[in-house]
Amino acid sequence: MRRLILAILLALALTSCSSSTPVPGSAPTDVASEAQPDVLILGDSYTAGEGAENPTDGYAYRVGPALGWHVTVDGVGGTGYVNPNHAMGNYRTRLAASGYGDTFDIVLIEGGTNDQGASADGFSAAVDDTLAAFGQRFPSARIILLGLFSWEDAITPEKSAVNSALRAAADSHGLEFVDPLTGRWFTASDRATLINPANDHPNAAGYEVMAARLVDDLRAGAAPTFEPARRGR
């Protein structure tokens, strides 16, 4: 009987040690870090946070904590799908010259405001080429397009045309499209409190609203997940 008791106690001790002692060469799994997607937000001056006293008050810097994203922000004022803003390059050339890798789970592309005035055919072709380039660079990423903004009650024909072309391109590539223009994220009544009159961009409070609306729209469309998108190409 004494031997049986000693054998049972020894077995229990070995079980306790094996459950609490890590296997040599193994590492603990951090579930939280694995669940946090790496996200690239690329765009123009809105993505750069121009208009806010501190650029990091911009919408692109705010959405990460709200959605649990690890965000890389790449915003360059004056650029677009067509417009290169002199030596800075348009979105496609900026992508080609970028130093970040190709492992982003989500890529959000904001822009089009600086392409107003481009020919309709030229703009559509540039957007199509740009989206193809992003798809090739990030084949497993969910790609989301963010359309234009307006602080006026009457949306200009130029903005409407560019926005519609972006929506059509997103549809043809099987991508999500977030539409601040049709959603009326801003109106003329917001100028007094949310817009920086020095450069007609959102101030910090305006970017806070922009981030909140973007988060709401992304959640409504289930875009925060980072499973590969099913593209129509």
Image (cartoon, rainbow, N blue to C red):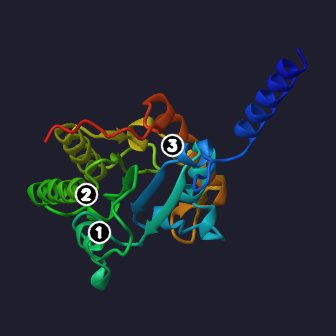
Q: Position of residue 65 (x, y in %)?
A: 63, 50
Q: Earlier in the sequence, mark 3 or mark 2?
A: 2
Instruction: Examine the rendered structure and indicate whether residue 14 appears above or below residue 142.
Output: above
Q: Position of residue 146 (x, y in %)?
A: 38, 48
At 58% from the left and 59% from the top, the residue drawn is 61
Of badges 3 and 2, the one in the foreground is 2
Q: Which residue is mark 2?
A: 134
Q: Position of residue 50 (x, y in %)?
A: 53, 69
Looking at the picture, which amino acid does disc 3 mark? Answer: Leu
Element type at mark 1 = helix
Element type at mark 2 = helix
> In the shown orientation, is residue 215 left or right of residue 133?
right
Q: Quadrant of the C terminus?
A: top left
At 33% from the left and 61% from the top, the residue drawn is 102
Q: Which residue is mark 1?
A: 95
Instruction: Examine the rendered structure and indicate whether residue 36 appears above or below residue 109.
Output: above
At 11% from the left and 57% from the top, the residue drawn is 125
